[in-house]
Amino acid sequence: MRNRIAALVESALQSSAADKELLSSPFPAVIIGTPDNPDHGDFSCNIAMQMAKGERKAPRQVAEIIIRHLGDGKGLLAKTEIAGPGFINLFIAPAAWQSALSEIEAQGEAFGRTTSGSGQKVQIEFVSANPTGPLHIGHGRGAAIGDTLCRILDAAGWAVTREFYYNDAGQQISNLALSVQARCLGIEPDDPRWPADGYQGEYIKDVANAYLARETVEASDQHTTAAGDPQNLDAIRTFAVAYLRREQDLDLAAFDVAFDVYSLESALYAKGSVEAVVQRLIANKHAYEQDGALWLRTTDFGDDKDRVMRKQDGGYTYFVPDVAYHLDKWERGFTRVINEQGADHHSTITRVRAGLQALDLGIPKGWPEYVLHQMVTVMRGGEEVKISKRAGSYVTLRDLIDEVGRDATRFFFLMRRPDAQLVFDIDLAKQQTNENPVYYVQYAHARICSIFENAAEKGFTAPRQPSPEALALLSTPEELQLMKLLCALPDTIDDSAIHFEPHRLTYYLTELASCFHSFYNKNRVITEDTALTNARLYLLKRTAQTLKNALSVLGISAPERM
RNA sequence: GCGCUUGUAGCUCAGCUGGAUAGAGCAACGGACUACGAAUCCGUAGGUCGGGAGUUCGAAUCUCUCCAAGCGCGCCA
């Protein structure tokens, strides 16, 4: 609806210019707002104030011209007015809201989807946890935000590829292999022979036992059978990575998160991509030798100091394969790439972008884009739970899903802006009370389903494509407000997609549920008045569909009973 | 010390890329079920938008500065 209003204002500007009443383009972008105060209309527009200076006219004078050219907006507008310093307030005709219900019915499960992405390719990389342990609560937030971002962009008409990157080479993996080997040999973390920087968690013992028992594990794309020999460090490394990847896959599956592509750091080395990147950086004269190491002059690209690429020991630092990996993304044709990661890794942004710029391949400066989520602190029993993978103390994503439930966990993670810190109070999230907003939303859906059961017993079903006259009965303030909110779903999805902000949808859902509950308490649906009953059942059918569609974008179920 | 993020009601947070009287949930207080689910609704109270300065028709929103918190600042990832 908002887009239709914007188009109306746009064409009013054009015709004003054609009639020489306003200076012609370029006009500033038309921004349609939704006023808090209902007296200010369903929508408002501030463009007259923006144009006043350039037009050398008073804002209200400009507004008067625009309004004259708007007319009744092809029947969409019931009233227009100039208010305050020069706002144009627009009142939508009730018939427009009513007929929108028919469109929602026609679109069914597709209602809410838009075409603003026009089928362009976008790749979103998220989670990308190192295969050195189970997924913890921080990964959970990344999984919820990343997955929902994918669903939102998909709903907004983008062609989304979901990708997971495994750092399965490098120092951390060596530490993992040494830790598992130690456990195989019966060495405990308090033993002096325990490797420095080893992973102390109990799960390492599970990996070791599985290895010694020669188990076979299936990760997303490979089968690995353990050699069982504690002296074979390579075999241990391969098995441990496969084992932990499988654990992560299971956790993600339980969270209803799936990926299209898994990329492995080790594959980049195997293909020679890492070496090729280094050679190109050297050839482009952005690298230099110093102190026995090879450096990249990242300070040429906005970094505060240069970075080592090849260490004295000959190995590459982690960001070199990262650059190779992103070059690979670019070469796969993704002109739009979003990386969802924890804010503790934010320093990689400058480095990776600098490396890509130094390749001098025409990659845009701000590519790739990033969505960073701030840290999650976990509260249990009123106390903060310290998270440390090495020490083995953390709350796993699996624990959380088992305790709190998938729907509540997802909703909880999505309630806040990604760049605000999140306190996850496990005791609170476990409570199945009204403090948990997901139940509030789901209850609205279940309640509507219950009304339909009741209606069926009395011989009512929602009509199909009723006439405008039949829908004209929907005229109470609550009904109009409800219809208006239903129409806002596509706009909300577009906004969430543009800003990469899933939390807008959780707020939308809470508002929609609240609007329904208010309507329900004030208006009786099933009455002696058959025509009114049918109209209201029709409205509720669309409300249930809208709740379900929006919940589905968040990966949350819409139960018919609770 | 430098960089990124944050600071809005007692608590947890929104505030639509500068708009009109700053909102919601929880907590507090007071009301509403012998008809569709009370996991609900209605009402009351609660704020110098961290402090200060600036930009303009107009600032919670933009700029500068100071204060506070989190996270980074490795030849770890």
Image: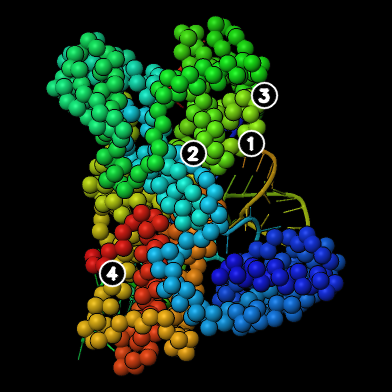
In this rendering, do the residues under marks 1 and 3 share a single chain? Answer: yes
Say yes or no: labels 4 and 2 on the same chain. Answer: yes
Q: What is the C-alpha distance between the residues marked 1 and 3?
A: 15 Å
Residue A34 in which image quadrant: bottom right
Disc 1 versus disc 2: distance between alpha carbons? 15 Å
The subunit carrying tag 1 is A
Kind of residue sitting beneath label 2? Asn
The residue that disc 1 covers is A364
Q: Earlier in the sequence, mark 1 or mark 3?
A: 3
- Chain identity of mark 3: A
* Pointer 4 residue: A446
Q: Which mark is residue A339?
A: 2
Badge 2 density bin: few <14, some 14–19, many ≥20, Cα 10 Å: some
Closer to the eye: label 3 or 2: 2
Asked whether the beta carbons under mark 1 and mark 2 sit within 8 Å of each other, the answer is no
Q: Residue furthest top?
A: A292
Q: Closer to the observer: label 1 or label 2? A: 1
Disc 4 chain ID:
A
**Mark 4 crowdedness (10 Å alpha carbons): few <14, some 14-19, many ≥20:** some
- Give left or right: position of A522 versus A11: left
Residue A138 seen anywhere in this rendered image of the structure: no
Give the quadrant of the N terminus of chain A. Answer: bottom right
Disc with the residue nearer the chain's start (1 vs 2)? 2
For image coordinates 50% across by 22% down, the residue present is: A273
Identify residue for label 3.
A300
Rounded to the nearest angstrom, the CA distance separating label 3 from label 2 is 23 Å
Find numbered disc 1 in the image and state the secondary structure of the residue it sits on. Answer: loop
Q: Secondary structure at mark 3?
A: helix
Residue type highlighted by circle 3: Asp
